Amino acid sequence: MKTETSIQGLSASLNPARSTRKIIGFVPTMGNLHEGHLNLVREARQLCDVVVVSIFVNPIQFGPNEDFDNYPRTLEHDSNLLAEVGCDIVFAPSVEQMYGKHPRLTNISVGEITNDLCGLQRPGHFDGVAVVVAKLFNIVQPNYAFFGQKDYQQLAVIKQLVRDLNMPIEVIGVPITRAEDGLALSSRNGYLSVENRQIAPMIYKSLKIAEQHLHEGQSLSETLTQIRADLSRTGFEVDYVEARTPMLQKVDQFNQDVVLFVAAKLGKTRLIDNLQVKYTST
Ligand code: AMP
């Protein structure tokens, strides 16, 4: 496995694959890797000849009071994990390499789907994600790019970006990897105190209970209210509990697939999760 820190170096490493028309798969990450990330890489390994993983903590997607400075940076450990799952090239650029040379004047705004859910709580976040992903796509020029369904809204934003701008890339959504107790794996889980780590799986539990209640005929609004109440009672500060269609539209009819979304804080740690369910009684 090679590690490249410059755009030029990455191009040199990828040129042989490009000129022989190898299928290039790309997994963008911010590092501090766990099984969730590794499952994206495994998926890429299955579909592609060459697998590139980027590790870049992108400053422009963090708000002023968010954890950019403290975000865990564990490149050596990440590289060992990536070598084990068959990554070919790690691209780990500096902030300067990605943003340094010229002032950036271009912004990318993906419209209404970014002004909802996490976008409401984190203004500018998805613009920052769209810019860095567009830059990385241009740098890597992959055939396939892999994103986790854990960040469901992010996946939707990237799919929209690729469609709107005719980027010649197929975006693949990979299911959420969970700990045994149901907690969606996240680099931010490491911030949780021992006590809060025990409470955290309640998010997934409340989503599964909600699924059951919807199947039993409970209304969507009652179900969402109940998730909110259950989480507040267990010690979460709830940011939002919402339902949307899989395309992130408002749910206006019974008998369809809906995605239940939760964002909630435990102490200072903000956790997100989602579950796609059938909104129809059994
Ligand atoms: P991050 O490093 O947090 O930016 O995540 C990089 C990629 O890994 C994103 O596409 C995430 O959606 C994905 N990812 C993170 N955690 C999980 C998980 N538990 N299951 C599936 N994908 C994940």
Image (cartoon, rainbow, N blue to C red):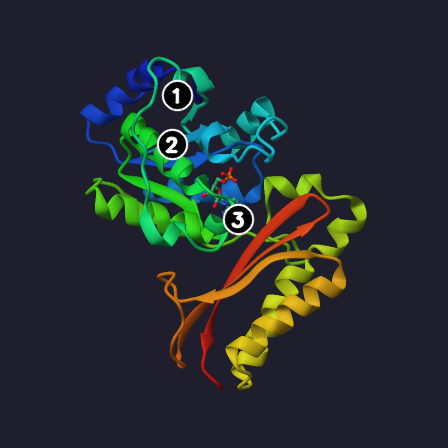
Q: Give me the C-alpha separation between circle 1 and circle 2.
A: 8 Å
> Which residue, given by chain and number where applicable, does mark 2 sit on?
132
Above or below, comparing residue 142 to residue 147 in the picture: above
Above or below, comparing residue 4 to residue 189 in the picture: above
Give the number of the mark in front: 3 or 2.
3
Kindly identify the amino acid type of the residue bearing the numbered disc 1. Met
Within 10 Å of the Cα at label 2, are there few (<14), some (14-19), or many (20+) other Cα atoms? many
Above or below, comparing residue 68 to residue 153 in the picture: above
Could you tell me if the residues under marks 1 and 2 are in contact, i.e. CB atoms within 8 Å?
yes
For marks 3 and 2, the one nearer the N-term is 3
Which residue is located at x 63 percent, y 41 percent?
A: 188
- Tell me the quadrant of the picture where the N terminus can be found: top left
Which residue is located at x 38 percent, y 43 percent?
A: 146
Q: Give me the C-alpha separation between circle 3 and circle 2.
A: 20 Å
Q: Nearer the viewer, residue 241 or 50?
A: 241
Q: Quadrant of residue 91?
A: top left
> Which residue, given by chain and number where applicable, does mark 3 sit on?
121
Tell me the SS state at disc 3: helix
Q: Nearer the viewer, residue 170 or 82?
A: 170
- Percent across and percent down for residue 8 are 32, 14
Could you tell me if the residues under marks 1 and 3 are in contact, i.e. CB atoms within 8 Å?
no
Within 10 Å of the Cα at label 1, are there few (<14), some (14-19), or many (20+) other Cα atoms? some
For marks 1 and 3, the one nearer the N-term is 1
Kindly identify the amino acid type of the residue bearing the numbered disc 2. Val
Q: Nearer the viewer, residue 18 or 107?
A: 107
Q: Is residue 222 left or right of residue 129?
A: right
Kindly identify the amino acid type of the residue bearing the numbered disc 3. Gln
Within 10 Å of the Cα at label 3, are there few (<14), some (14-19), or many (20+) other Cα atoms? some
For marks 1 and 2, the one nearer the N-term is 1
Q: Nearer the viewer, residue 50 or 157?
A: 157
> Which residue, given by chain and number where applicable, does mark 1 sit on?
98
